[in-house]
Image (tube, rainbow, N blue to C red):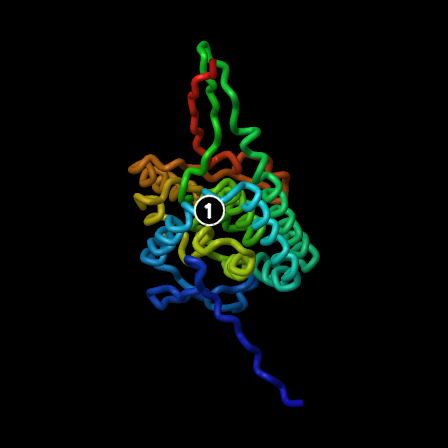
């Protein structure tokens, strides 16, 4: 039988539930840890970032209004879809991060488990972030957590899949919508994750994934007036300071970069980072 040509994958952005190329038409070369060519990834532009924010804002009302139970179901479905493509993601993570196959498979398994972890928190976070407050008067005083809104995320640079999942999942499980910039050096697992998201019942626009230059995309997201919060997990110290200053213009909530062991128990820190507290006073009945 004659040798056949390989079918190379065309990686695309994920915006509003669709898979567009960058509006600029640009791409950049992605290589493995040894410098060997892997693929061309879309080089997203500032306009792509703005389009992603529009999509995230459009999706926010429906997603934040969904029941916590339903959001948990959908995150669990993402875990199912990721598990079903374990071999593909193992190969992509191994190439992206220069890991042996067994270590890459462990990273993929941890990413699956991370979706399940946060799915389980969907209908429980109100119990740890809300309260009935004692007041000196004939009133009920109740505090409950609500999503902040549109969260822009600069994904970790060194953990192409597990780190990405670890910053996206806690933001969306509580009702926020996300615009995420994938690892600049290793974007391919993130762009493949978009395909799992698209087939997991996740409403269009809840997660939007961009690939390209982190510095180029971080600046317009930090300054965007319709972005409510910023996770700088993938920013270096110098750019993080600049982005935080830009975010102050509309009082965005900012989570600063810090060393993280993405394979460790995630705890509830990120889960609570992008929540606001609504307090309601109600008179007691006679």
Left or right? Give the position of 9 relative to 98.
Answer: left
Q: Is residue 34 above or below residue 78?
A: below
Residue 54: horizontal and vertical position, in percent?
35, 52
- Image mark count: 1
For the point 54% across and 54% down, which residue is it? 160
- Residue that appears at 48% across and 54% down: 203
For the view shown, which residue lies furthest in the bottom direction? 1
Q: Residue at x 61, y 60 (%)?
A: 89
Of residue 241 and residue 2, the one placed in the foreground of this image is 2
- Image coordinates of residue 13 in percent, x first then y, are 44, 61
User: What's the residue at 61%, 46% (across, down)?
Assistant: 114
Q: Quadrant of the N terminus?
A: bottom right
Query: Dot 1 lies on which element?
Result: helix
Q: Position of residue 97 (x, y in %)?
A: 58, 56
Residue 170 percent across, percent down from the top left: 53, 42
User: In front here: 96 or 87?
Assistant: 87
Residue 78 higher or lower than 259, as above or below: below
Q: Quadrant of residue 108?
A: bottom right
Q: Nearer the viewer, residue 29 or 166?
A: 166
Name the one closer to the observer, 227 or 199: 199
- For disc 1, the neighbor class at 10 Å (few under 14, some 14 to 19, many from 20) is many
Going by the picture, which residue comes out furthest to the front? 286
Q: Which residue is mark 1?
A: 63
**Which residue occupies the extreme top position in the image?**
136
Q: Is residue 101 left or right of residue 138?
A: right
């Amino acid at each position: 039988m004659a040798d056949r040509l390989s079918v190379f994958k065309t990686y695309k952005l994920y915006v509003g539930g669709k898979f567009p190329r960058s509006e600029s038409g640009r791409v950049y070369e992605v290589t493995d840890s040894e410098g060997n060519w892997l693929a061309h990834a879309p080089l997203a532009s500032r306009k792509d970032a703005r389009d992603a924010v529009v999509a995230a804002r459009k999706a926010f009302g429906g997603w934040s209004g969904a029941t916590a139970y339903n959001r948990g179901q959908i995150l669990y479905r993402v875990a199912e879809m990721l598990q079903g493509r374990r071999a593909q993601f193992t190969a992509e993570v191994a190439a992206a991060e220069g890991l042996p196959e067994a270590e890459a498979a462990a990273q993929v398994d941890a990413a699956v488990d991370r979706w399940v972890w946060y799915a389980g928190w969907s209908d429980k976070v109100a119990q740890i972030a809300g309260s009935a407050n004692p007041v000196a008067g004939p009133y009920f005083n109740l505090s409950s957590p609500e999503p902040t809104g549109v969260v822009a995320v600069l994904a970790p640079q060194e953990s192409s899949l597990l780190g990405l999942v670890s910053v996206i999942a806690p933001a969306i499980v509580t009702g926020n919508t996300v615009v995420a910039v994938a690892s600049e050096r290793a974007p391919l697992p993130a762009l493949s994750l978009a395909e799992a998201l698209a087939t997991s019942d996740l409403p269009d626009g809840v997660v939007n994934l961009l690939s390209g230059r982190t510095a180029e995309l971080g600046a317009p997201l930090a300054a965007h007036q319709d972005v409510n919060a910023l996770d700088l997990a993938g920013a270096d110290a110098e750019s993080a300071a600049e982005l935080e200053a830009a975010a102050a213009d509309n009082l965005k909530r900012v989570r600063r970069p810090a060393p993280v062991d993405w394979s460790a128990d995630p705890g509830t820190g990120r889960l609570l980072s992008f929540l606001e507290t609504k307090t309601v006073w109600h008179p007691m009945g006679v």
